[in-house]
Image (cartoon, rainbow, N blue to C red):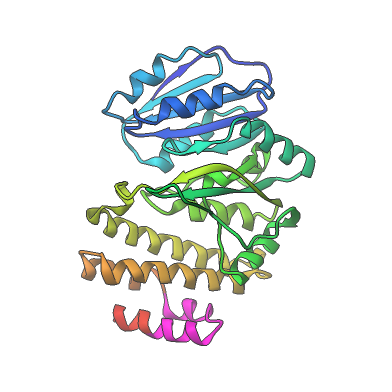
Amino acid sequence: MALIQQDRQAVIEVSVIIPVYNAAETISHLISKILSETRVAIELIIVNDGSTDGTGNLIRDICDNRLIVIEQENQGVYAARNAALDIHHGEWVIFLDADDDVEEGFIFARWQTAINTQADVVIFNAWRTGSGISRTPVHTRQPYEQSLPGHEWIRHCVTHREWPHYLWLQIIKSSYIRQHSLFFHSGKSHKDILWTIHLAVSNGRFYLSDCKDYTYKVNAHSITHRRDYYDVRAQSYIEVIAEIIRLARLEENKDISLFLFRHALVEARHFLGLFRNNVGDKVGVRSCFRESISAGDLFRGINSLSDVFFFIKLFGKLL
């Protein structure tokens, strides 16, 4: 791994972390938006994860003492974010995706909200867009403009069946990350779910804002929609479900254990959708699921008649 670093500032208030892979068409616009920020001291850490399309040259040509570039062979987005976390110096952290868009001044606005609410984690809202001009909010059922402990947020999200786990919704206090030794689990997909669950399980102070300062562009041609990637996604869901169950079993999480089991069952619904319609190696994925997850643990997450029917369907398909 190579590190290209400009002169450091004495005090860095926000670290902005962006993993990039073949993002030459979009990354320059996003960098320009971020580096236009002058009201808060930032560092921009870009991890070039083995790009082959000239992304690295575009980034290296930018002269700004707030920019840090990490060059590494392709290891995946979660390894890239861990590499940035290892060297960041900001008091707060924001994660972005290279192909999305942000509002002008959003870093300063997020930082102000985090400071004013004395939160460990602030969850913002965003717009979701597809190929057309219409847009919809990423979430609609959160306890907006409220502060609550992480465990209470888990209860709310599970009860309302809305789990806004996207990393680019968050600004997180660096000391909170370090205090709880938080990191991204290895893998290629869906580990942002686990990052957010670990944030909340650590039971810090959360604040929910309905401010939509980010535009998430749904890309039908992204790797997650490729047919040869569905098996990877299914395996990742198995790992996510197994880790949620592990957390549910811990004594320190006994007050939210039931809600974690319920959420594991929700993620199992996502897994089954992939398994039934898209997975190629059904024998191998079925075997992995049965070795990693017990029916008894998922049964503990049943909360409705619909859950009962789903549970029967799930294990009917996996027998």
Q: Is residue 295 magenta?
A: yes
**Which quarter of the figure is the C terminus placed in?**
bottom left
Q: Using the image as rendered, state which of residue 315 and residue 28 is in the foreground.
A: 28
Q: How far across and down, in percent of the image, does residue 93 sit? A: 60, 36
Q: In the rendered view, would you say 221 is above or below 112?
A: below
Quarter-of-image position of residue 267: bottom left
Q: How far across and down, in percent of the image, does residue 197 sit? A: 56, 57
Q: Using the image as rendered, state which of residue 294 and residue 14 is in the foreground.
A: 14
Q: Which residue is found at the position 54% from the left and 84% from the top?
A: 304
Which residues lie in the magenta part? 294-312
**Which quarter of the figure is the N terminus placed in?**
top left
Q: How far across and down, in percent of the image, does residue 211 sit? A: 65, 46
Q: Which residue is found at the position 42% from the left and 82% from the top?
A: 311
Q: Which residue is found at the position 34% from the left and 34% from the top?
A: 21
Q: Main secondary structure of the magenta part?
A: helix
Residue 32 visible? The answer is: yes
Quarter-of-image position of residue 213: top right
